[in-house]
Image (cartoon, rainbow, N blue to C red):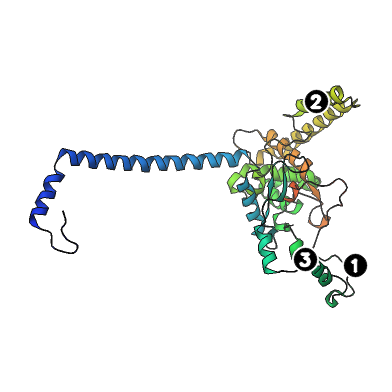
């Protein structure tokens, strides 16, 4: 009805178009089209909103979600000196039989490095061996080449005594610290308080990526929610495998009572000054933190905290015959 391209519109065409637009058939067809378009847009918005809600729920409930690993990796690499090999990810279950582990889930970065730096294994050994004048006289020293480094977690993203003291001292009134000094607590107790408080901060905590990767119900013997399950497992070991388990239930209950005593004392002295997740008591939060520290903390140099929580490294499954950790200075 608009006539030829670029030409003037004839008066009869304008009149005919106006008459057509006033008909019931046109208005019905037009309204149905608009209604369908609006319904489609609304449905897409609802679907997108629902998918986002479901994704958020999955992230909250699943500490092994791939996005949790991506967020944790990002938190580590943003720290100066931090590095996580791009091909690493969660393995669920882990090849060793554990429920979860860390391993290679891709090879894109490796393939890129291979293309950019071609060569053979023999050439590499020659390059890095005693035949290389650059390494003459230091062949006995450990050499950490870039392609052999998988994870580097700087001190800035390790939970240790210095950071715990700084945060907790600012939270707890001086008169309370005079009666129950934080200095009297060992590193484990400080980490329990620190982790419990940071969990309560939720999105306001710099440790949210790390805390999101931790199990909701840690499988340690101190967990009161799982204690009955462990007792049943001990009984099954005796009945099904005929293992000698005499005294195991007694020791488990004894350890549980001691852990309960620790969390009760921490809650009494410092609990009212800690942030606690909604719908949870201070004691429950401290019990959760105690299990995480007991099962995941690793030793380090006393200078920076003799006991620490090191994100991502705490999820690596270790060979029982493997060597211990070696703490690096960053200048290797």
Task: Give how far apart the Cα atoms at labels 3 and 1 are.
Answer: 15 Å
Sequence-wise, which precedes: disc 3 or disc 1? 1
Q: Which residue occupies 26% across, 39% down?
A: 32
Q: How many marks?
A: 3
Under circle 2, the secondary element is: helix
| Disc 2 to disc 3, C-alpha distance | 47 Å
39 relative to 149 in the view: left or right: left
Residue 45 shown left or right of residue 77 in the figure:
left
Q: Nearer the viewer, residue 223 or 322?
A: 322
Q: Quadrant of the C terminus?
A: bottom right
Q: Position of residue 124 (x, y in %)?
A: 80, 68
Return the mark for residue 140: 1
Q: Residue furthest bottom?
A: 133
Q: Earlier in the sequence, mark 2 or mark 3?
A: 3
* Left or right side of 28 for 306: right
Q: Position of residue 221 (x, y in %)?
A: 79, 33
Q: Which sits earlier in the primary sequence, circle 1 or circle 2?
A: 1
Left/right placement of residue 3 relative to residue 42 reads left
Q: What's the residue at 23%, 42% (across, down)?
A: 30
Percent position of residue 27, x then y = 19, 41
Residue displayed at 72% across by 58% down: 154
Mark 1 crowdedness (10 Å alpha carbons): few <14, some 14-19, many ≥20:
few
Residue 134 sits above or below residue 210 on the image: below
Mark nearest the camera among 2 and 3 is: 3
Circles 2 and 3: CB atoms closer than 8 Å: no
Which residue was labeled with disc 3?
A: 145
| Mark 2, residue position | 231
Q: Residue at x 81, y 46 (%)?
A: 186
Q: Name the secondary structure under disc 3.
A: loop
Name the element at disc 1. loop
């Amino acid at each position: 009805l608009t006539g030829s391209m670029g030409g003037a519109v004839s008066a009869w065409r304008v009149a005919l178009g106006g008459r057509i637009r006033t008909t019931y058939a046109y208005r019905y067809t037009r309204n149905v089209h608009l209604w369908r378009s609006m319904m489609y847009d609304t449905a897409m918005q609802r679907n997108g909103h629902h998918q986002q809600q479901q994704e958020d729920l999955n992230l909250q409930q699943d500490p092994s979600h791939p996005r949790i690993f991506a967020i944790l990796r990002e938190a580590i690499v943003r720290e100066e000196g931090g590095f996580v090999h791009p091909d690493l990810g969660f393995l669920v279950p882990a090849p060793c039989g554990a429920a979860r582990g860390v391993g290679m889930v891709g090879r894109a970065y490796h393939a890129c490095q291979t293309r950019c730096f071609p060569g053979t294994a023999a050439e590499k050994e020659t390059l890095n061996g005693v035949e290389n004048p650059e390494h003459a006289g230091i062949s006995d020293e450990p050499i950490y080449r870039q392609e052999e480094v998988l994870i580097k977690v700087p001190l800035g993203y390790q939970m240790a005594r210095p950071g715990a003291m700084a945060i907790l001292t600012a939270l707890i009134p001086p008169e309370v610290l005079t009666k129950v000094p934080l200095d009297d607590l060992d590193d484990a107790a400080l980490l329990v308080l620190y982790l419990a408080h940071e969990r309560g901060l939720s999105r306001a905590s710099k440790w949210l990526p790390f805390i999101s990767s931790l199990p909701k119900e840690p499988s340690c013997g101190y967990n009161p929610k799982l204690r009955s399950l462990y007792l049943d497992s001990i009984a099954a070991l005796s009945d099904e495998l005929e293992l000698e388990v005499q005294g195991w239930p007694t020791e488990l209950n004894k350890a549980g009572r001691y852990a309960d005593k620790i969390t009760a004392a921490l809650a009494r002295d410092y609990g009212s000054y800690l942030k606690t997740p909604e719908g949870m008591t201070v004691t429950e939060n401290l019990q959760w933190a105690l299990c995480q520290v007991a099962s995941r903390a690793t030793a380090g140099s006393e200078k920076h905290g003799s006991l620490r929580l090191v994100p991502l490294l705490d999820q690596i499954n270790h060979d029982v015959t493997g060597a211990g950790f070696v703490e690096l200075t960053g200048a290797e």
